[in-house]
Image: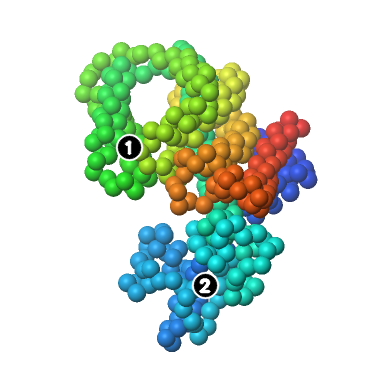
């Protein structure tokens, strides 16, 4: 069975790799990933290496370590303006500007082709500036990281939720998922306790900037509470009565409910009640709203797979339903998921750009393509603020759409 699945997967990859659009889209994706990973080293207001007072420093690398929480700035460098010093030796990034750095000498929408007040050609603003003098090229580079982080991580979260719920709905239907009543009640009770402690009690105990710890801890407490109370209920109560859970109906009704509400209206409503906007909150919201398509794809595949001979043979041999689902059925149902994830990433990038364009959702100090477009709305003559971010959004969305199309046609070929 495993060899057959590997052969099918190998043939699928061969068909996909023969497509020219796939090869170009893959190169474009790798290029975007490169920019996103090395944004600190491509656009920064600190030098790579410098020497002053006969001491060597690596400010960019130090800043990365500080951002990762593995180091701290010395007291004399915490608020240092690195461009104002004179060095004995220095190497600067290609774009010597941070996305939020203000250039007072080139503010008020400096065009890429106009005369700029810079000390050398290396400090020129190649894509112009906005009204405050922030470099557009630096914003484009750092915006690439934001777009990919939000697009990929939100769809990863949506994929996990969609695969889990879609697999259960399609494989078990309405009659095959049976659990002990004590485990079900214990699981609900534990989830309630985890919800109360993880999201209500802990909220006043954390600082306002600890959103990641807040949401991650809340999810952990809900999951751990549900599992622990379910196990304790099974060990404590001797009742063997089972409850048949109509998981297919439950999942489909939830999907229909979410899809019946206009997506933009639902998204704006949730974003409006978030106490402090952050990248993580946007990822969580988009992931929690975007799993329905993945779940429907997986459910459709499972409805076909559960009636195949090898699944029936596993049942006859006494293989547990959960083991049969995760080890045998699910790996053969993931083909459409890749397609949904590829198209979903392009959709979430557009949504993030739309939210930033409206001025909601993202923190004010976060550079993004949508925010650059918003600046262009207040200054129609600053064409570079609309052209360059618009091209970046168009090309990125096209790349992911081509990846999804190649996977889809490769699977049907």
Q: Whole-percent x and y of residue 35?
A: 59, 57
Q: Whole-percent x and y of residue 294?
A: 56, 29
- Note whether 75 is above or below 272 in the view shown: below
Residue 218, label in figure: 1
| Quarter placement of the N terminus | top right
- Note whether 112 is above or below 186 in the view shown: below
Res 71 visible: yes
Residue located 39% across and 13% down the image: 244
| Quarter placement of the C terminus | top right
Q: How dense is the environment of label 2, judged by Cα within 10 Å: few (below 14), some, or many (20 and up)? A: some
- Note whether 142 is above or below 393 in the view shown: below
Residue 48, label in figure: 2
Q: Whole-percent x and y of residue 333?
A: 59, 29
Q: Earlier in the sequence, mark 1 or mark 2?
A: 2
What secondary structure is found at the residue carrying circle 1?
A: helix
Residue located 73% across and 49% down the image: 24
Q: Quadrant of residue 20?
A: top right
Q: Quadrant of residue 52?
A: bottom left
Foreground residue among 406 and 15: 406
């Amino acid at each position: 069975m495993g060899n057959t699945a590997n052969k099918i997967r190998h043939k699928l990859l061969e068909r996909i790799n023969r497509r020219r659009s796939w090869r170009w889209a893959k190169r474009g994706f790798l290029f975007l990933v490169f920019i996103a990973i090395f944004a600190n080293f491509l656009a920064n207001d600190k030098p790579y290496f410098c020497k002053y007072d006969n001491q060597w420093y690596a400010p960019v690398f130090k800043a990365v370590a500080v951002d990762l929480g593995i180091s701290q700035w010395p007291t004399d460098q915490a608020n240092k303006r690195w461009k104002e010093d004179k060095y004995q030796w220095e190497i600067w990034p290609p774009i010597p500007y941070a996305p939020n750095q203000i250039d007072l000498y080139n503010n008020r929408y400096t065009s890429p082709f106009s005369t700029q007040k810079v000390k050398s050609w290396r400090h020129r603003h190649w894509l112009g500036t906005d009204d405050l003098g922030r470099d557009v090229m630096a914003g484009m580079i750092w915006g690439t990281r934001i777009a990919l982080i939000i697009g990929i991580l939100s769809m990863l979260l949506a994929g996990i939720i969609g695969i889990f719920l879609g697999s259960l709905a399609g494989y078990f239907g309405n009659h095959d998922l049976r659990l002990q009543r004590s485990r079900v009640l214990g699981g609900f009770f534990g989830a309630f306790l985890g919800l109360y402690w993880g999201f209500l009690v802990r909220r006043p105990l954390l600082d306002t900037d600890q959103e990641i710890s807040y949401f991650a801890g809340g999810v952990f407490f809900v999951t751990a509470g549900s599992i622990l109370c379910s196990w304790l209920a099974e060990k404590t109560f001797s009742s063997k009565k089972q409850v048949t859970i109509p998981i297919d109906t439950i999942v489909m009704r939830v999907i229909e409910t979410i899809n019946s509400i206009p997506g933009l209206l639902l998204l704006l409503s949730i974003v409006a009640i978030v106490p402090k906007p952050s990248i993580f909150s946007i990822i969580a919201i988009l992931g929690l709203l975007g799993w329905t398509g993945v779940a429907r794809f997986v459910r459709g595949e499972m409805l076909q797979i559960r009636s195949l001979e090898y699944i029936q043979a596993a049942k006859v041999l006494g293989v547990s339903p959960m083991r049969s689902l995760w080890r045998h059925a699910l790996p053969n149902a993931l083909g459409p998921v890749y397609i949904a994830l590829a198209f979903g990433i392009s959709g979430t990038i557009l949504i993030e750009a739309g939210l930033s364009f409206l001025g909601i959702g993202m923190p004010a100090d976060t550079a993004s393509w949508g925010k650059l477009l918003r600046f262009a709305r207040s200054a129609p003559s600053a064409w570079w603020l609309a052209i360059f971010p618009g091209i970046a959004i168009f090309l990125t969305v096209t790349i992911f759409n081509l990846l999804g199309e190649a996977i889809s046609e490769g699977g049907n070929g």
